[in-house]
Image: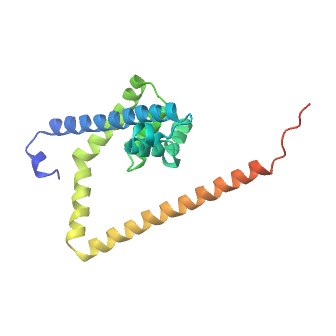
């Protein structure tokens, strides 16, 4: 069930508007990452980024070159351009993949073509069952106690999964760094 302001419009119009919204968001994320990432990279040579580009851009640049966006870059390296449309089928990871595409400088035309199937899929989901799921979640929060308990259980599962995943990732990063430091230096001839 679509929101009231969209119910009076034909499906094709809602679908087209949601596709345009998804494409615009993807382009904005890509270009923000590409431009701010470039600025921060240029300024990394001895100048504090926050002094040169301002604290907001410096914070964005730090996020772009941090662990989260590097997960998106790893997905791009592992899966190739398929990661871009697949990202549209996720919550949260989508932003990381789109930003990573800007940071690693996927050519704009290639990025745009790669994001189109994802934007179409996202619009298809949200113009059909996506809004119904969203409304059910809101109804559960404001209505029946069983719905609230179900949402809290789902939230607990999601948070637990994220915490366990981060601990596993941090542990494997520590193992890799200790393995690197344990290797003897190469012998010079």
Q: Is residue 156 left or right of residue 123?
A: right
Q: x%, y% of residue 31?
A: 37, 32
- Depth check: 187 or 162 in front? 187
Viewer-closest of 6 and 128: 6
Q: Determine the residue located farthest toward the left in the rendered image.
A: 8
Q: Is residue 160 above or below residue 101?
A: below
Rendering coords of residue 67 (x, y %): 53, 48
Residue 24 location, x and y as percent? 28, 34
Residue at image x 41%, y 37%?
53
In the picture shown, does residue 152 fall above or below 182? Answer: below
- Taking the image as shown, residue 109 lies to the left or right of residue 162, namely left
Q: Residue at x 60, y 57 (%)?
A: 170
Closer to the camera in the image, 38 or 155:
38
Q: Quadrant of residue 51?
A: top left
Where does residue 165 sit, x and y in percent of width and height?
Answer: 54, 59
Task: Indicate left or right for 122 with 100 as reference.
Answer: left
Q: Is residue 120 visible?
A: no
Give the answer, above or below, for where 154 lies relative to 96.
below
The way the protein has been coloured in the rendering is rainbow
């Amino acid at each position: 069930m679509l929101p009231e302001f969209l119910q009076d419009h034909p499906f094709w119009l809602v679908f087209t508007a949601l596709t345009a919204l998804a494409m615009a968001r993807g382009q904005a994320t890509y270009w923000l990452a590409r431009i701010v990432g470039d600025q921060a990279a240029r300024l990394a040579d001895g100048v504090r980024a926050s002094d040169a580009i301002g604290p907001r851009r410096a914070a964005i640049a730090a996020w772009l070159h941090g662990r989260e966006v590097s997960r998106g870059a790893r997905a791009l390296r592992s899966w190739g351009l398929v990661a871009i449309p697949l990202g549209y089928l996720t919550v949260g990871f989508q932003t990381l993949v789109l930003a990573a595409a800007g940071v690693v400088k996927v050519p704009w035309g290639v990025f745009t073509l790669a994001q189109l199937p994802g934007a179409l899929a996202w619009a298809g989901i949200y113009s059909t069952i996506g809004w119904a799921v969203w409304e059910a979640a809101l109804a559960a929060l404001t209505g029946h106690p069983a719905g609230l308990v179900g949402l809290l259980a789902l939230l607990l599962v999601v948070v637990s999964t994220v915490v366990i995943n981060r601990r596993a990732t941090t542990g494997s990063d520590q193992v890799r760094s200790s393995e690197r430091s344990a290797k003897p230096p190469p012998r010079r001839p």
